[in-house]
Amino acid sequence: MPRSRKQSRYDFLVSHHFTPLEARELSTLPKMTPALKEAVRLRDIRRAEFEKIAARKIARGVWSRDIVQKKWMENLKRLYTRRNWRVQEGARGAQQSMPKGSPNPWALYRAMERIAPPKRDVSPWQLRRVFGKTHLERGLIFVQQAERRGGVSASQVRLWISEKDNAIAKARGQHRYQLVVERDRLERLLR
């Protein structure tokens, strides 16, 4: 039976010393994503350094061969804690159900994006489809209707502007540009 692409990417990541959790989450990305390639490269380097240390400790009798995998997992736990790559608030909305404080592979991926940015403006982890209109989009539709009718309260417009500013701070790429355009349109209503 032929394996799926996701399964082959999962196997690829596990073979490069990613944990099953990391491989399960990141196997949705293409292998050629620059940030994922960088993550694989750095993980291979980290594992090679770890194996040298483990070989020295086994030779001196400090470690046994049985605990090497356990020590590797502890090494990765320290990495996630030190870099603050842990789930901050737990799952909200349509996010994956990851408990607060657990390792967050997407935080690792975003950190790698800073080192090796994607060729497109929007990273793959942001390309999930959201169905229906968001609260901000409904607000913009209401503003467009109010512009045609001629009138909307200044306090409501200021509230929408603050919501747009919060959304702009979290957005990237083309989505951020669109939000800036929408915010500027709202600001014109106050003049």
Image (tube, helix red, strand yellow):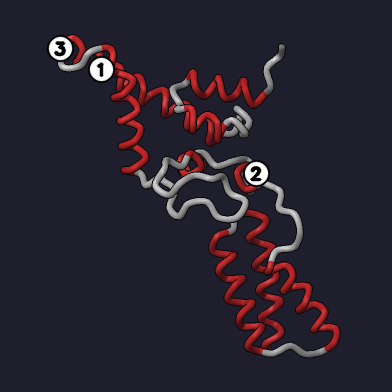
Helix, strand, or loop for circle 1? Answer: helix
Graded by Cα atoms within 10 Å as few (under 14), some (14 to 19) or many (20 or more), the crowding at tag 3 reads few
Q: In front here: 101 or 143? A: 101
Which residue lies under the disc numbered 3? 61
Residue sitting at the far right:
148
Q: Are marks 1 and 3 in contact (CB under 8 Å)?
A: no
- Residue at (48, 51) in percent of width and height: 90
- Residue at (34, 20) in percent of width and height: 69
Q: Which mark is residue 156?
A: none
Q: In front here: 68 or 144? A: 68
Helix, strand, or loop for circle 3? Answer: loop
At which x and y percent is residue 59? 18, 9
Which residue lies under the disc numbered 2? 120
Give the amino acid at mark 1. Answer: Ala
Give the amino acid at mark 3. Answer: Gly
- Residue at (67, 75) in percent of width and height: 184
Of circles 3 and 2, the one toward us is 3
Of circles 1 and 3, the one toward us is 3
Which residue lies under the disc numbered 1? 54
Can residue 38 be seen in this snapshot? no
Q: In front here: 107 or 73? A: 73
Q: CA distance from mark 3 to mark 2?
A: 50 Å
Q: Quadrant of residue 137?
A: bottom right
Helix, strand, or loop for circle 2? Answer: loop
At which x and y percent is residue 46? 36, 26
Q: Are marks 1 and 2 in contact (CB under 8 Å)?
A: no
Q: CA distance from mark 1 to mark 2?
A: 40 Å
Q: Earlier in the sequence, mark 1 or mark 2?
A: 1
Give the amino acid at mark 2. Answer: Arg
Q: Quadrant of residue 142?
A: bottom right
